[in-house]
Image (cartoon, helix red, strand yellow):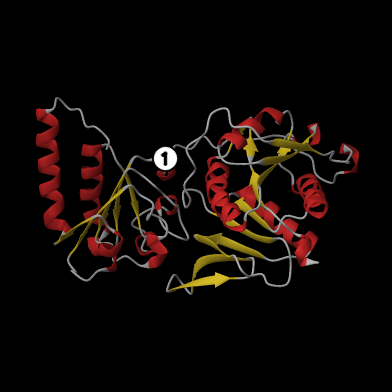
Amino acid sequence: MIEEYKGVWVFIEEREGEIAGVSLELLGAGRDLANKLEVPLSGFLLGNNIKGLANTCFEYGADEVYLIDDPILQNYRTEPFMHGASHLIRKYKPEIILYGATSNGKDLASAIATDISTGLTADTTMLDIDVEKRLFEASRPAFGGNIMATILCKKHRPQMATVRPKVMKALAPEKGRKGTVIEEKLGLEEKSLRTKVLEIVRDTTKKANLADAHIIVAGGKGMGDEKNFQLLYEFADVIGATVGGTRDVVEAGWLDHHLQIGQTGETVSPKIYFAFGISGAIQHVVGMKNSELIIAVNKDPNAAIFDASHYGIVGDAMEILPLLIQEFKAALEKSGGVMEHV
């Protein structure tokens, strides 16, 4: 019975003793949903030697933590994680579960949805609740980012969604906050599993990390051509920024895919986001709208990017970029080469 399901849960993803940032962000989003429904917010945590991480969950908003601590869970594998999580879900019956849209989070969420026969909304960007009907409203861009679709799971529980990193905001941690830990056993033996982790090979390729950048200089097709992107790199070099771009730019071959920002690329939330020649399609905006300060430059005064910006400059990026480079260089020389990140 659907009425038996109560509570909001968040999958707490852990790696090498550290909780993933997206899990802390989702505790913040889950706290809001739980408050509206007047139910507890819980994290569920699977791993090996991870009991101490429950305190971090409490500090970031959780009331309870469901915990399975077992050596088999040292490294992520679909089979044992699904087995443990499905056991918790069937026994304690949460009505909403949030997962980070990471490789592990998406894998686990889809496996659980299949195992317990419920729905799953992927890559959501907005979360809300119809309190009267207790329906979870998970919204995401659809049809190439041209519309926002709100997806409901009316006949099955729990209601589940994956949410990309940097879309939600974590709560400020409340040091010393306490909660309840509920421990369960995994109930599996290593010899019964079909997969084993033989080796972990780390990616040592040096790539720009958009997700951690404090300042991002992004360009769209309005930059004209790939050659003009050199102005973006020059400006970024002056102010200590990372360069990114829109899907159109990546598809045109002007930038590598790992520098794409938007629904099908990276989701970012830097302190400052410069948008040059970007129209403001929703597919891109959902990937950068949580930036603390957004400054847009576009020739079209009616460009949608201005609706998402704190400051806008109507003009040709090819004319404005050299002026910005000149002014920032002069300011840095005057300050002795020191630039404070706002």
Quadrant for the C terminus, please: top left
Q: Residue at x 71, y 30 (%)?
A: 51
Choose between 245 and 151: the one closer to the eye. 151
Question: Is 249 left, or right, of 55 in this rendering?
Answer: left
Farthest residue in the top direction? Answer: 336
Question: Is 119 left, or right, of 307 in this rendering?
Answer: right
Image-quadrant location for residue 81:
top right
- Residue 275 in sight here: yes
Query: Vertical placement of 278 versus 21: above or below?
Result: below
Image-quadrant location for residue 313:
bottom left
Image-quadrant location for residue 242:
top left
Instruction: Give how far across and how far down residue 204 sits, in percent.
Output: 51, 34
Quadrant for the N terminus, please: bottom right
Choose between 285 and 11: the one closer to the eye. 11
Q: Which residue is mark 1?
A: 212
Question: Is 230 left, or right, of 139 in this rendering?
Answer: left
Q: Residue at x 17, y 27 (%)?
A: 337
Identified by mark 1, the residue type is Asp
Choose between 65 and 85: the one closer to the eye. 65
Choose between 105 and 149: the one closer to the eye. 149
- Residue 16 in sight here: no
What is the secondary structure assignment of the residue under circle 1?
helix
Q: Residue at x 54, y 45 (%)?
A: 22
Instruction: Give how far across and how far down residue 307 sits, in percent.
Output: 28, 64
Instruction: Give how far across and how far down residue 33 sits, in percent.
Output: 57, 55
Residue density around tag 1, few if under 14, some if 14–19, many if 20 or more, within 10 Å: few
Instruction: Give how far across and how far down residue 150 sits, in percent.
Output: 54, 71
Q: How many marks?
A: 1
Query: Vertical placement of 230 versus 61: above or below?
Result: below
